[in-house]
Amino acid sequence: MSYINSVISPSILQSGLTHITPVEERKVIKKFGMKLLERKIKFIPKFEYPKHVEECVKFVNNLLVGSILEIDIPSKFSYTNIQQVVTEKVTEKLLENDKLMNHLEILHEVDKKNLFDALDEFIDNIQNTFEKKYIEEINESFKKFFISDLPLEFYYLMYKYSVMFSDYIRYLKSIFKRYRSKLFSTRALSDYKLFKKRFQNLKNKIKKIVDEMDLLTSKYFKLLFYLDIWNSDDYEDILEPKIYYLNRVDKIVYYSLFKEYKDKLYEFNQMLAERKAVTRKVVIDKTFVNSIKNMFFTLTFGEAIE
Amino acid sequence: MDSSIIFSLLFDEFKNRIDILKSILKKYKLKCYLTDSVNAEIKDAFHNIMDFLETNLKLLKNLIIEKKGISLRIPENAINEVLEQKDAMLFEKSFISIYNTIKDEDIRERRIKMLREMEEQVMYLFDGIFLEQDKININDFFVKYLKMLFETISQLENKLSEILSKFIENIINVIPSSSLIDDLHEIGIHTSDARHIASVAKYQANLDCKVIFVSFDYKHIVNKQDAIYRISKVQCTDPLYLKYYIEEFVSSY
């Protein structure tokens, strides 16, 4: 799960943004022999780096590891030990992404002028890491379909998650772009109250969508942890690359977790569609689409509409 | 709306009738709804295609490996095995083997139609690949197929989401009368269609309003509109005639 850090990065970003507040700094300066009032808007983080990184790691662990307590585990394992193993591995994955950590640091050093540059870089980093790592792993996982007994739909929804995640990242980027011009308008820059209000609106908007995605991510990892833990021979085996077998898990539990994840995924996808955020257009082959269409009509209506 | 309308919007089928429907919706500012059962039917269609492909893809891959004379007992051998253009006939023979396994007469015709589509997709990909390269690893070939399939289905699902948010006001969640479902069943309406119509009937009665059920399913719904109306008081029609039902209703109101 080398893509783990990109999947949870927007949550880190949100946690980062939550802790940033704009403040107006006023000081009297002397220019041309006159006293002038200089006003500057600065962003102040709630925590100092590296405490913020610790906060982020804690936040991510709560999000992911918390889901383990909600799943049934084999009697050979204990919740405490599994949580410890998962926390160590997730933290290791998080910290090994130097760029991500670097961006977090930058987010706390910037003034208002380049906060949005830093945000853009942060988002780009997430997108690049995700697309590289996750797509690699997804392609690799497709091979497992022919060996494992997991349903094809499981692999499809892993793919779907990747497509949707890219849309989600692009959507976040578009929000930042929109708010950048709103915040740096002459009007907002000369009116601290308005600036503060708009910055809060940005945080609220980001929070709303990231919270929804966090919920989906926790369901996604709950399902993956369930499969991974039950397909692991010992603690060392947990979160290491492996093929998941349905015959090693309780099918009723699997299908219930799968349904939870699937429902949330489609709910989120519908939300993106309603906000016109599903922007990734792949040119799909017409012959292929036509054949899939025939399958739909055959399966659903037979000859009823011919 | 019936799922046949939604699928026609999705696949640009019945274009003229769909355009008429769109213009009526606009002109009369009509609200469209899906019953819970129609919504489930749409979702199930994707799920059923996955189910079908799941069984047959694994079967196809194993048959190809078997026909290439590779032992399935040593999976490593199969992983490294390559396909060449001359292996096209192995695909033909493998599909023939799958066709021959379908014995159940009730589902035979439908299964064969579905398999023919899968066969076309697989060979379309095969032809495309060998225009550009001499050989491909068996695993890579099937991974390419899965990627193409997933990409197509995902795009269709996205388009479906857009259609639903554009045309559908809400999903009707009512419990239909089981006796009405039975009555509809008796006049030859399939259980799933009977459930859609009974849900519409319940909604119409609950809200004391007029609902028209539009469908392209001629065999099971549109062609039986009189019998359905007698039993359920639900008017079913093809979009082509929708405006006349609306006008008749408005003039009698």
Image (cartoon, grey):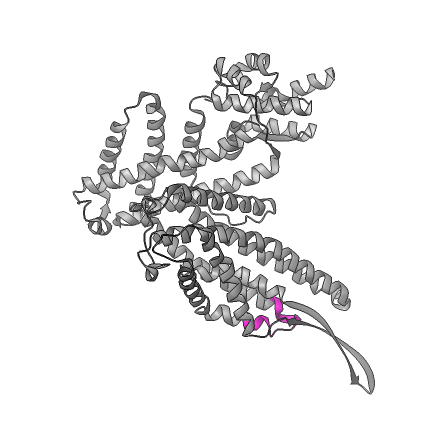
Q: Quadrant of residue A291?
A: top left
Specify the quadrant that holds the N terminus of chain A: bottom left
* Residue A161 rendering spot, x and y as whole percentages: 47, 50
Q: Quadrant of residue B161?
A: top right
Which one is nearer the viewer's eye here, B194 or A54?
A: A54
* Residue B29 rendering spot, x and y as whole percentages: 69, 30
Q: Is residue A111 left or right of residue B76?
A: right
Give me the residue at 28% from left, 50% from top.
B133
Q: In this view, which residue lies farthest toward the bottom?
A: A33
* Number of marks in the rendered image: 0
Q: In this view, which residue lies farthest toward the right?
A: A34
- Reply yes or no: does residue A3 show up in magenta: no
* Residue A196 rendering spot, x and y as whole percentages: 72, 64
Which one is nearer the viewer's eye here, A76 or B61?
A: A76
> Is residue A162 in view?
no
Magenta span dominant secondary structure: helix
Give me the residue at 51% from left, 35% from top.
B10
Question: Compared to B44, does A11 lie above or below?
Answer: below
Question: Compared to B226, does B105 lie above or below?
Answer: below
Question: Compared to B44, does B82 lie above or below?
Answer: below
Q: Is residue B161 left or right of residue A245?
A: right
> Is residue A210 in view?
yes
Which one is nearer the viewer's eye here, A306 or A41?
A: A41
* Residue B243 rendering spot, x and y as whole percentages: 65, 21
Give me the residue at 72% from left, 19% from top.
B250
- Reply yes or no: does residue A106 show up in magenta: yes
Question: Compared to A113, does B231 lie above or below?
Answer: above
Specify the quadrant that holds the C terminus of chain A: top left
Q: Which residues are magenta?
A: A105-116
Which one is nearer the viewer's eye here, B60 or B179?
A: B179
